[in-house]
Image: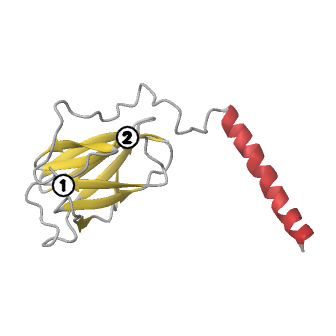
Amino acid sequence: MKSRFAFSVLPAVIVMTAFAKEASAQGAIRKITDPIPAGCPVTKPPVPRFIPPGTERVPLIGGYFFGTPNLWVWVLHNPVSMFGEKVVWGSQGYDAKADRRPALTITLRRLDPPGPAVAIDGNAAGSSSEHWESFIMTGVKFPDTGCYEITGRFQGEELRIVYWVW
């Protein structure tokens, strides 16, 4: 039984190893420790720091708020994984209890090389926590590593952020 398993898995391991070596030789494999390329205009923390209304008690660990009181987003400090990230949005006056499925639309556009904007279903859901009364939780899955612009639209407002995805 063991020998059959070894013989059926061995060809796959050889193919995957050859692919990884070829991709590595071409520079296609990126690591989280690789620097963000200069051509990727990742969103930087605003100066002075932006604190949206109603978020004064939110612990500011791992990221920062970006935007205006009408539409803002929590931006992560670290590079983002292509396997998917939660993206948290908010808007002054938004009530998660009254609007469990907010009409937030999200588009994703690759910047390196430039690509078309693609609408994605971020499954926007009204949420709350002990520190934060109302916010909109979404999910974004990136098709590949690279530089991406995420655009959110909500109640006539639009906000763009740029992430480096490893």
Which residue appears at 12% of the width and 72% of the height? 98
Which residue is more in the foreground, 129 or 166? Answer: 129
Residue at far right of view: 3
Q: What element carries label 1?
A: strand
Is residue 126 found left or right of 26 in the rendered image? left
Q: Is mark 2 on a helix, strand or loop?
A: strand
**Residue picked out by circle 2:** 163
The way the protein has been coloured in the rendering is secondary structure
Which residue is more in the foreground, 93 or 18? Answer: 93
Q: Which dot, 1 or 2, sits closer to the camera? A: 1
Q: Quadrant of residue 137?
A: bottom left
Which residue appears at 61% of the width and 39% of the height? 29
Q: Quadrant of the N terminus?
A: bottom right
- Which amino acid, by three-letter code, is at mark 2? Tyr
**Residue picked out by circle 1:** 90
- Which amino acid, by three-letter code, is at mark 1? Gly
Give residue 158's position: percent from left, percent from top: 18, 47
